[in-house]
Amino acid sequence: MVSEMESGHIEEMDIEVLPSMWPDDVGTDAGKQFNVEKPKGDQDMLEEVTIIDDATIVDFKRLLELTNYTETGSSQLAYLVKHWEYKQANAVRLLREELDILSKQREEVELKKLEILEEHRFEEERYGGDKRPISILDEVYDLWQDIPRRKNDVIVQNKRVEIDAEYDTVVYWKQRAMHLEKLLEASTQREQILTEKLQESIKDLERQSSPVEELSQILKRADNFLHFVLQNAPVVIGHQDKELRYRFIYNHFPSLHEDDIIGRTDVEIFTGSGVKESQDFKREVLEKGLPAKREITFETDLFGSKTFLIYVEPVFSKAGETIGINYMGMDVTDQVRKRERMAKLREEIAVQKAKETELNKTIHITEETMRAKQMLATMSHEIRSPLSGVVSMAEILSTTKVDQEQRQLLDCMLSSGDLVLQLINDILDLSKVESGVMKLEATKFRPRQVVKHVLQTAAASLQKILTLEGHVADDVPVEVIGDVLRIRQILTNLISNAIKFTHEGKVGINLYVVSDPSSVKGEGCHQNKVSVDGDNEEQPHSPETKVWIRCDVYDTGIGIPETALPTLFKKYMQVSADHARKYGGTGLGLAICKQLVELMGGHLTVSSQEHCGSTFTFVLPYKVSTASDNSDDPDELSDMADNNAATDEATERFFQFQPRTLGSLFSSNGSSRSNMGYTRSHKLNGFSDNSYSFPSNSVRSKETASVEEACSTVDDAETLCQPESSSSHSPDPANQDTVCRGNRCQDDTSSQFQNPIIDSTHHKETSREVAVAANTREPQGTCQRREKSDTSSQCVSSCSTEVPKSTLKPKILLVEDNKTIVMVTQSMMKLLGHRIDVVNNGVEAVCAVQHHNYDLILMDVCMPVMDGLQATRLIRSFEETGNWDAAVKAGIDQGVLSLDSLQNGLGSTPSAKRIPIIAMTANALAESADECLANGMDSFVSKPVTLQKLKECLAKYLP
Amino acid sequence: MEVGQMQRRLAEYTKSLFMEGILDAQFLQLQQLQDESNPDFVVEVVTLFFDDSEKLLNDIARALDQQCVDFKKIDAHVHQLKGSSSSVGAQRVKNACVAFRNFCEEQNAEGSLRCLQQVKQEYNLVKNKLETLFRLEQQIVAAGGSVPMIESSF
């Protein structure tokens, strides 16, 4: 029973002792983090595990010191000792109990002996006398007194005879002694056995391992477990003392020897970034006395770049001072890297998303803009097509025999038609200016002419009794450089506005040079301006290349109320709804003007007095053309300079158009050098020649018309009805008839009447389109008519005779130097049902165009000998001029160009039409789409060419 | 080998060429152009491309070898090669040419030489691959099978 008690106790103790190995907070029963398995027999699983022992480097002395110093250590030790003491005490207690029992038994035995002896003595005494001696031990005696008495009582009844018989006999006493003897013997025997047992139990105790041994065994097992658990963990565990010198370190991947670490600080052991930080961190913990965690990235020679998650806790002495730190580090390099990568990815995704939304927004805006543009383009196209029909009719009409007055009417019709075309373009321009894609051109022009033409055109459509006048100061240069179309547009807009709102009096333009745009502002009302003549405002003309010219457009009209001034230049704003009803207009005119002026670097202002009139003033900078020779630039100036009044015109300074003085339209009744004759001779210039040599000159006359007249833009429908109003002056109703028919024909291309007429004016692109449309519907009929028209217009050229043949199957030319591309493109074309001619460079392309009539040219941009851009320019030049001079100038050998066609060229036969030229670009920077279009190409296809792209292209450019 | 098996191999092989970026969709364009009337179109074009490219590569190498390198000339050659390669769908050759042209623009002889090597390498790669492809096709035809049209689904 004793041994049982003991073993049970040990078991109990095991469980109690183990937790004491761990820090107090770890060993609580609930959810113990550490549980050590008890070995079962010889099946120790740890034996199968190899444990690397040398990973731990322990300063045992320090450990001992620690246990002495640290609270945990000492409490642990105290606990151990207490336990040992308890155990010992227990053992002692047991032994003592045992001894007690034994001594009790012995006492008993002795007592018995005494009793026996007493009895004997009593017997003897009885023998000797009846004296009853008083025992020293009264109580004992009493005790014993009772017993015999009782015995006596009992015996009296039962053993009376026996007693009687044996009492006092020797035998009886002998027997009694024997019995007692036996009892004593048994007792002694028991005593012996007990002693033996005690002996045994002591031996057993000795045999059993001492608690220290047991404890150390347990410790070792725990240690092994620790190793087992930690053997592959990327952790470093260490203890550092107050000076942060390592006292203990466990590192699974030791890169240093014990000597190198123990007794040293981090900084002494290794160097690199992060070391200092970790040292500082540890010190911080040491100072604050609070455990903390931190992630530190090391960059050391010892183990490269690694990130550790470090946990540092302070260690306190019994006195509560910090005496060191425990620290644990785990390598989290991969995790950190992953985390960083994730963060980066997330960031990128965020950026991507932001970009995407931005892009989507942009796309949306672009789409919107595109749609708006598309609508504008469609609209203007819809308007342009019938209009060009009208203009074409008028042009044809002007080639027929008409008298002077009719010619002037026609002239007006043509210019007005072009004006409307221009207006459509202007609407497009407005959107262009607003979207910032408006490009300004820089061309030479003559300000005086601009003023005159604007006034002329205005006078032509004038339905009121107004005087139109223009003053141009002497110091205004004869020629300046600027965007003449835009300037005319502005002027025309302002003039037509002025006329619209003026019912009597005059409308005029003052043009003069100002030195500084800010010094002269439109001040006061127009009356001042009128009184001040051109002479007064003259300022010395500075010889600078830049000159600022101010232009006042004044009227004696209804004026503008002051309240309306701020919104005057806003889009779609008119002074009042009443005005809008009364005067019409879109409300766009002034907005366009202002935007254009500002785009050109100037500014537009207005001053007005109600019921007196208004003055619109714009000041613009111009470059002065240095070479002001009139006739050196045939392209720009021939149409202006080739009349005999050139010198007059150059210095003309006053124009006036009186109401209805001339039966028809124009009057120029002003000062000295300007006269009606001049005006007329100029107007005749374009057209009177035409009637004699129309085929050769039609292009040019058209050019003339578009350049000169296009500028007289009017911003409302007034101009549109101008042909009608002017036709009322015309005695020839057939003219009007033609115009109307033309108009109608435009809507109905199958109309028989219209086709020949249009064909004879193929230089005009829009009419070409019409012709093309007609071709598709009834190709044969068209051919016939075409021939008819050819004869009627006396235009006999090799080109036009070829037309009928080529209309059946479109003739396509491929200009490409790369054989592979040629082969591929050829095959694609074949698949699409076309055979194509192939040439290898620009020069060959020019020759090919010369000899054959192509419906479409696919042109590579980068080619040897001559690139596609130049070739296109030469072909376009031929189409416009009807000769190959440009090609010859460009260095193409005349031998290559056939003499025959050269002759044709010299005969100034204009090309039948404008061949669509499609660039094939490799999408390189040098071959930008803009450049292609600027060089006269119609479109472009990016390389590599695919069937789809070709199909689309053919669908678009071939009927 | 069985015809079906060969056809599968061909399809896989072709697919791999696209996956590796050696060929692009332009090659499919070529294949679309091939029909009964023009049964060897692809081979013809590609052969032309090979001949042309070899000539150009030689020209470029020679031009780069000169004492005074005429980068304009080289650029023109590379442009040619780029055009040809893009029109047969030899994507990687084309891309190498794009890089090459940048160096021409910089007049960088060293970079150009490196690019020439790159272009040559890509050219040889595509040449080998295409020749293998054609051989496979021939084998299929010889075995009585038809060369399946490749869908541009990948």
Image (cartoon, coloured by chain):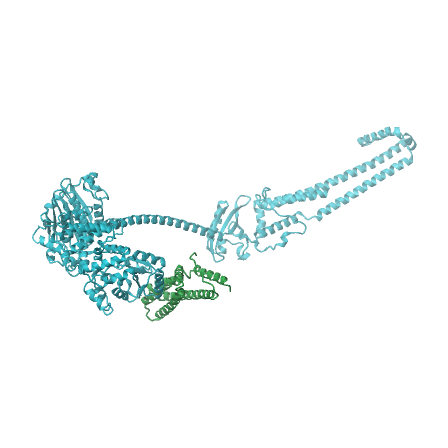
* Percent coordinates x, y for residue A13 in the rendering: 65, 44
Describe residue A104's horizontal placement relative to residue A442 as left or right.
right
Q: Residue at x 67, y 48 (%)?
A: A210
Describe residue A695's horizontal placement relative to residue B7 as left or right.
left
Q: Residue at x 85, y 36 (%)?
A: A117
* Percent coordinates x, y for residue A478 in the rendering: 14, 56
> Can residue A421 be spotted in the picture?
no
Viewer-side residue, B56 vs A311: B56
Note the chain letter of the cyan one: A
Viewer-side residue, A330 vs B111: B111
Residue that protrudes farthest toward the left in the picture: A672
Describe residue A70's horizontal placement relative to residue A906 as left or right.
right
Tell me the quarter of the picture where residue B43 sits.
bottom left
Viewer-side residue, A366 vs A28: A366
Can you say whether A349 is above or below A113 in the image?
below
* Percent coordinates x, y for residue A457 in the rendering: 15, 50
Image quadrant for the N terminus of chain A?
A: top right
Tell me the quarter of the picture where residue A396 sits.
bottom left
> Can residue A175 be spotted in the picture?
yes
- Count of labels shown? 0
Can you say whether A43 is above or below B144 in the image?
above
Viewer-side residue, A908 vs A742: A742
Say which colour chain B has. Answer: green
Image quadrant for the C terminus of chain A?
A: bottom left
Tell me the quarter of the picture where residue A708 sits.
bottom left
* Percent coordinates x, y for residue A923 in the rendering: 33, 59
Residue that protrudes farthest toward the right in the picture: A165
